[in-house]
Structures are given as structure tokens and as C-alpha cells.
Amino acid sequence: MTDLSRRSFLRFAASSSAVLAMPIFSEGYMAASAMPQTSSATTSQPIYIDANENPLGPSAKARQAIVEMAPHGGRYDLDLTKQLVKSFSEINNVPSEYVRAFAGSSAPLQYAVLIFTSPSKSYVTADPSYEAGMRAALVSKARVVKVPLTADYAHDIPAMMRNAPDAGLFYICNPNNPSGTTTPQERIDYLVARKPAGSLVMVDEAYYHFTDMPSSMDLVKAGKDVIVLRTFSKIYGMAGLRCGFAVARPEILEKLYDVQGWNPLSTTGVAAAIASLQENNLVPERRKINTGVRSNVFEWMQKQNISYIPSQTNFFMMDTKRNGKTVMAAMAAKGVMIGRTWPIWPSRVRITVGTQEEMDRFQHAYKQVMQSTEEALLESIPAGFRHPEWREGFVS
Ligand SMILES: Cc1ncc(COP(=O)(O)O)c(C=O)c1O
């Protein structure tokens, strides 16, 4: 079994019986009872707070839409995708020609890097940030310019511009993964106004809904050289259903589609996305649930004197003051799968905000792990968990 399929297998084994018996609960019920659909907080099953997923899964109405769409799954349904694009553009007051739906936001992110960077047009990113674009830049053979975040964990826009006069694409992850922090809109506006001619700014708003920050979509509406990415994988709890958007001028979107070719979306994913957009309260309710659980874990860390970055999203970086990879492995051995380290921050690990029960289990396991010496810790880790690098190939 490969490392990645091990992850899938563990998850499936843990959740399959729960899924089979899955009734449709209201959001309030799910939050109160912590009846996660994609993870389990019982002590016998591993918990996954490693990939910034939403433990609530798709909303009740989205699940219903999936069930209703399933019998029609034998057909490509391009009209359904058009309907999704229309809903999104109406809600966001952006012309529908400026919006394209994809199977998640990873696809347009990678296509944009392939199209707009090259050996003579660099790929510019914060450090640390979400690394998928850097991987695509290996294919386009672009120079990768990594610029450390500022002291307040924002993108250092002047340094990004200074270090890349040859920029093809500026990748701005806002809020940033893994810091969970935002870059003020005026700094992004500044970049867009003064970037090198011919370059593009891609603003990845995967975690936008967890915050009250403005969106860079206004720059797209104003006709600027900007692509905004959105996804249903995070607040909407649809990571496995694969649905997202790129928002940009039509000729930029055309280029993305040229790379993608014929690749219609999953009809169940699109049906779930349409249903989710129709639920006006979904985003504020889920944001509130996430903020509540996150505040509790922040309070706990303050009491424990653990330093962390005050994230505005559904994940945060905490400083273990140890080798983060060893801590990850020791936690995995206790059935608590936490997120990874970044090369620039080797002692920090990224934790996804799960349900309250999951965070309680995380806190309990973390305390135990930190009571052990590094040596005892290494000894306590079973062979299968000794190399947490297996998750390194898994960019999330
Ligand atoms: C910042 C960021 N962008 C994009 C993605 C890709 O998500 P998806 O392809 O599921 O939309 C992720 C996934 O974790 C992410 O963290």
C-alpha cells in the first residue's frame, strides 16, 4: 500500500460505517453533537486534522442534492455547470463570462502557473505559503522566487516586486496557508497597480469565507490582470466532491480552458455546490462554529504557554519548539493526524480546526507527547509512523 493510499484506507475504514448510517442532520445538531461525517472523534479511530478540511462535510441540503443527482450520473451535464456559474456570478455581482467552474481550485491554479510562467517569467510566492504552484513551476521551469512573510505574517509585496522584475505570476494566498493570516487589500491593490507589465496576480481565496476581509474580485471586475480562485473544499465541506472557480477576464479564462480541454465536472459535485450557494446562512453559521472551536484551542494554548500564529481561518501554526516532524509522527502514533511543517519553520506544525471533540483529543495527545523527551518520543513511534515524510507528497 502506498503512503497516500494508507491515508485513504485509514480514513475509509474509520468512516465507512458512519457514512452508511448517515442521516441528514441540521448544522446546529452537527455542531452540538460533533457528529462529524468525515472523521471520528471516538478514541478507537484516528482523527484527521491535517488537511484543512471541514469536519462537518457537505451541508444537509448539499447531501440531499447529491442523492437526487446520483441516478443522472450517466450523463455529462454542461447546463448544470452553467447554472452553477450563473448562481455564483449573481451572488458576487460579477459577469458570468468572468467565472469558470473547475473540479476544485487546484486545477486552475496549476494551469495558470503552466501558462503564465516560463524559464524567463518567474513564479513569485510567499514563504511559507501553499506550495502547489511551486510544483507546477517545476514543469514550466520557471525561476521560483520565495519571499518570507512580513513580521505581521502578510505577503511582503514590496520585496516580492523587488526580487522579481521578471515576474510572470505573483501568487498571493489570502488568507495564507499555512499561517492563516491575511494580507491587507490595499497592499494587493498596490501590487496590481505597479507589477511588471505582462505579469499576472493570482489571488487564492480558498479560505476567504472564514474571515471578514474584502475579496480581490473587485480587481477582476475592474478589468485588471488578476485571477481569483475560490473553492467549495473548505467552508462548504466538499473537498472530496471537487468544485471551485477561477474568476478573471474572459480571455484569461479561455487560456486556462485551452490547457484543460474537455473535462466536464462531476454532476454530484456541481449539484451539491448549487445547493450550498442557495443556503444563505451556511457560511456565517459555519464561520461561527469554526471561530468558537478555534478560540477555545487558542485559549488552551495560551494557558499552556504554547506559541501560535493567530490565524483567522480553519487552521493554525503552533510552535512545538522541537522537531515538528517528530511531533507529527508521535501524534500520528496516538491516532491524531496533524498537519505538516514547512522548511522555513521546522518546529511549527499546522493544525486544522476540527470539531470540539477532535480538538479535545488533540490537546490530550499533545500534552502526552510533549511530556516525553525527544529520545523517548522517537522510541515510542511505531515503524509505520516513523517517517512522516509520507505526507509530504500530499500538498494541502
Ligand atoms: C490555499 C489553497 N489553495 C488551493 C487548495 C486546493 O484546494 P481544492 O483543489 O480542493 O479546491 C488548497 C487545499 O488545501 C489550499 O490550501
Image (spheres, rainbow, N blue to C red):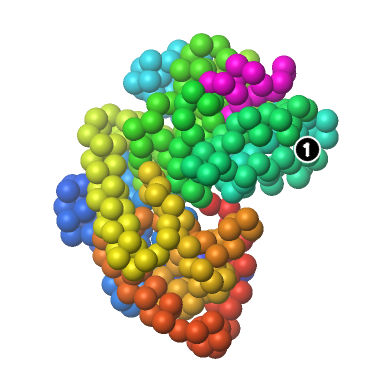
The residue positioned 21% from the left and 53% from the top of the image is: 31
Is residue 190 shown in magenta?
Answer: yes
Residue 98: x %, y % from top left: 51, 17
Instruction: Name the image quarter holding residue 200.
Output: top right
From this viewpoint, is residue 356 visible?
yes
> Can the viewer see residue 358 in this picture?
no
Q: Secondary structure at mark 1?
A: loop
Mark 1: amino acid: Ala
User: Can you name the residue that lies furthest to the right here?
Assistant: 119
Tell me which corner region of the image, top left, top right, bottom left or bottom right, holds residue 324: bottom right
Q: Is residue 245 left or right of residue 16?
A: right
Reply above or below: 311 against 102. Answer: below
Q: Relative to residue 144, is residue 280 depicted above or below?
A: above
**Residue 39 at what x, y percent from top left?**
35, 62
Question: What residue is at 24 percent from the left and 43 percent from the top?
Answer: 288
Q: Position of residue 145 (x, y in %)?
A: 72, 40
Q: Position of residue 114 (x, y in %)?
A: 71, 34
Q: Nearer the viewer, residue 232 or 287?
A: 287
- Asked if the magenta segment contains residue 149, the reply would be no
Please state, as top left, top right, bottom left or bottom right, where the N terminus lies in the image: bottom right
Instruction: Look at 61% across and 74% down and name the residue there.
Output: 387
Q: Nearer the viewer, residue 357 or 67?
A: 357
Residue corresponding to mark 1 = 142
The residues colored magenta run: 189-202
